[in-house]
């Protein structure tokens, strides 16, 4: 799912850091998801994907994650 790459300038264009201070854990995690989705959509748009393609891809990925989630098998650190 992730590529190891030392190309920081490219990452700086697409990765927004969510501030860690003054947020509860739920707000912090929701903020990280929000910014990650926006960053992904920005990258997908810049690579030529249409808004419909972006929506379908993201919804498909999120659906797969939710459908395969099994809480009893997850560790506390996951």
Image: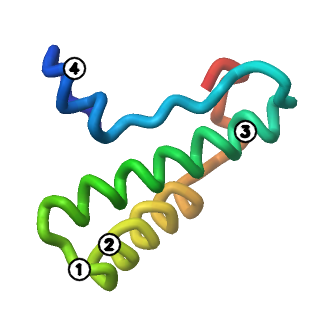
Label 2: which secondary element: helix
The first of marks 4 and 3 along the sequence is: 4
- Give the residue at mark 2: 54
Tag 2 near tag 1, CB within 8 Å = yes
Frontmost residue, 27 versus 1: 27
Q: Which mark is residue 72?
A: 3
Q: Nearer the viewer, mark 1 or mark 3?
A: 1
Q: Position of residue 52 (x, y in %)?
A: 32, 84
Seen as rendered, the residue at the extreme bottom is 52
The first of marks 2 and 4 along the sequence is: 4
Q: Which mark is residue 8?
A: 4
The first of marks 1 and 3 along the sequence is: 1
Place residue 14 in its image quadrant.
Answer: top left
The first of marks 4 and 1 along the sequence is: 4
Separation of disc 3 and disc 2 at Cα?
32 Å
Q: Position of residue 40 (x, y in %)?
A: 35, 52
């Amino acid at each position: 799912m992730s590529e190891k790459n030392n190309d920081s300038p490219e990452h700086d264009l697409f990765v927004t850091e969510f501030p860690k201070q003054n947020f509860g854990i739920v707000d912090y995690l929701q903020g990280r998801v929000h910014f990650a989705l926006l960053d992904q959509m920005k990258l997908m748009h810049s690579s030529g994907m249409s808004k419909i393609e972006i929506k379908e891809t993201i919804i498909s990925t999120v659906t797969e994650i939710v459908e395969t989630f099994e809480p009893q098998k997850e560790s506390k650190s996951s």
